[in-house]
Image (cartoon, coloured by chain):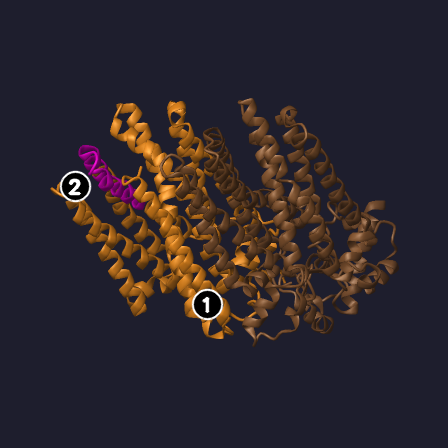
Chain colours: A brown, B orange
Amino acid sequence: MNYPFWDVPLIGGGILIGIVAILHVFVAHFAIGGGLYLALTERKAIKENDQKLINYLKKHSKFFLLVTVVFGALSGVGIWFTIGLVHPSATSTLIHSFVFGWAIEWVFFIVEISAILIYYATWDKLDPKTHNTIGWIYFAGAYLSLVIINGILSFMLTSGKWVDIPFTEPSKKFWVGFFNPSYFPSLFIRTGVALALAGLYSLITATRVEDEELRTKLVQYSGKWLVPAFILIPVAGIWYISIIPPLAREISMGGAPAVTVFAVLSIVFSLIIALFAWLGPIKTPKQTSFAFALGLLVIGFMVTAVTEWVREAVRKPYIIYNYMYSNAILKTQGDKINEIGALNFAKWVSVKEINEENVLKAGEEIFRVQCQSCHTIDGYNGIKKLISGWSENYIDFQLQHLDMLKGFMPPFYGTEQERKALAKWLYSLNEEKTK
Amino acid sequence: MGLKMTQQIIIPEPDPIPLPAPYWLLKFLLVLTFILHIIAMNFALGGGIITGITDLIGRKKNSQFHLNLARSFSKMLPIATAFTITLGVAPLLFIQVLYGQYFYTASIILAWPWLSVILLLLIGYYGYYIYQFNFEKLQGVRAWIVLGSAVLFALIGLIYTNTLVLMLTPEKWAQKYFANPHGTNFNFDDPTVIPRYLHFLVASVSVAGLLVLIYGLVKLKSDESFGRWAVRYGGLWFVIGTVVQYATGIWFLLALKKDLMMIFMGGNGVATAVFGISVLLSLVSLILILLSFNAQNPRPLSIFGIVLLFLTIVGMAVMRDILRDAYLSDYFKPEQFEVQPQISVLIVFGIVFIAGLITVGYMLNKVIKAKPVTT
């Protein structure tokens, strides 16, 4: 309500964030796991004095550079741009709560970028051992950037005791928010994902190696990179689910059918990858083709997509748990909004007082500032479809008990007159349809 | 009602979370990291323009000097772009810390252009890599690829200027937003946008000219005549750019509202001094670079000139910051910030920062030792 609402037609801002975020996550985890892959495999090649393997790594590092440094870095900035536009208040909270967390992460970015650019450019210029060291520095920088961002991301769902610590204890507040209840399970899951993606991506380059002996060896080796993930992710996953807020668990396990379906899909797709990685690269590396590798990577992308979607969905009705609702209203602001009214509280509305003539317009404005961060009118999660056939009274009844009837929605805040105006406007959408 | 609406000034409340460090420290970090970002940006954007044009000249005149320079710079451009982005993260962070309510609002009003920056950057960035990796293969088209990337980057600058000027003029927000909440606005109705933008664009060519000059200085050892040529050629880009820069600078100054312009003309002592010194430094720098063209040893003169120009950039960045606060003086009151320092976090940041510098230093040292001549 503090910031103007950016009206993204049809898909809404949430989907826009989703698109950018999923693409980024899919590449960023590769940037981490793939760093370990480069450093470890180079070490192996040096030990075994395997020049062919070094030549493969040279090519693979070019692929790695073009995917992670360009797309990975840019899509990361892209998420930041997008959330700043769609959820400025939440972005501002994350920025202000963790200013020097971000600054620390920035230092790791600088190290990471410097290392990978040098690594790629100095295959023939540095002695193998020093070159390998640069690879390790890259991986350290990349992994440490995960160590930081993971604290901020997991904070959004499990803000824990952060909310209760006063701002007069700033350092404590920072660390409690950062090392929040889901920090470690989340870090282990992401580590597993990073390792698995290192394997999936390197299969892409490994299956294209011409020398059959090297290809067979590499395909099997890369396939084995998926194994730790299938131990790490389920164990850390159960830990994670046991620790998240009860409501979030409920939403993912039946409370909201769509979310549950996606959660199940995530597991099914992961099992498909496990099965085919076992049957293909690990058991029959010689026969594993580039197309097969590409197929695995595509399923890997689908796992990323559905899992990230679930992770976002279970946070409802909050965007930052127990602090800020999905529509950017602070939990502590509720009473004030009920008292002075949503239109008075909101900054960017063209109606401040409701009268006979502007009641529909007022309803529309209330919808914009309080509902539209999740609902479009006609498109994604479109409100028109959701309330189709409802009477004005029933809509008003729903609005009075939103958080009770639909646990994943924030309560309606505002005066009775405003609630009635919103109900009237929503009902008018029904009428439009029947006309 | 309608008329009242258009004159309405709406400014979001600042974030209720206190600052984790004193205001001056955050301001210092904002300006410092902006300077680093803008220099890398100058290399990426101005470097692309110079490389493309140099490549075209080289092919037309069949000049090996021009072609060698383009080939060398093809490797520099993606690196400069990577650092422009990474170094840009920090000022983008600190601007949101100190000026969040202005920054978010302006970017939302221009949401689609603002978001398109990512796409333009992605295409331009890959363009630079295509140029580097296919330099020998592409021949005729390659110069147009690198110039195309540079044009996309220049477009990003234009979007930035649009947004960041709108950020300074809250008077215009409500009117623009209520007329169009879909984020497809621009800010070209502001008379300072074009000259301000040109002032940044021309600077990038000028500063990238100095990078060519530095490259020439490095090459002097191994290839005297090529090095000499590059020193002059880069210096010439710098000199011409800087002369044009005086024109765009005057235009920008005159386009400012009178009270804003006057802070640099005696209205504010510090602003006037920084302005005067910066212009003077750039002038001396210009003369030193010109003198280095025919000097027996161009090194001392040109290095001195480069240092002075660096100081000019620092001065300009400080002026830019003073101007921002002058624009916002009715609304932005630094003394109103609540500060609750996160001492332990600051200490961790300090340690990580120093460790990071040492690590990067270690790696650079290894690279330089491995091959004394940078290519």
- Give the main secondary structure, helix, strand or loop, of the magenta stretch: helix
State whether residue A405 is above or below residue A298: below
Left or right: A371, with A187 as reference point = right
In this orientation, which residue lies closer to the viewer: A258 or A295? A295
Q: What residue sits 36% from the left and 46% below the top? A: B42
Q: Which residues are magenta?
A: B205-231
**Residue that appears at 58% across and 40% down:** A198
Q: Chain of mark 2?
A: B
Q: Image point 68% across, 71% down: which residue?
A: A332
Q: Is residue A25 left or right of residue B217?
A: right
Question: Where does residue B309 sit, x and y in percent of width and height?
Answer: 26, 52
Residue receiving disc 2: B293
Residue topped by disc 1: B347
**Residue B221 is covered by the magenta coloring:** yes
Position of B227 relative to B117 (above/below) = above
Residue B271 horizontal/vertical position (percent): 31, 65
Mark 2 vs mark 1: which is more N-terminal?
Answer: 2
Q: Write down the quadrant of residue B142 in the picture.
A: top left
Relative to A361, A150 lies left or right = left
**Is there any visible trace of residue A109 in the rendered image?**
yes
Q: Amino acid at mark 1?
A: Ile
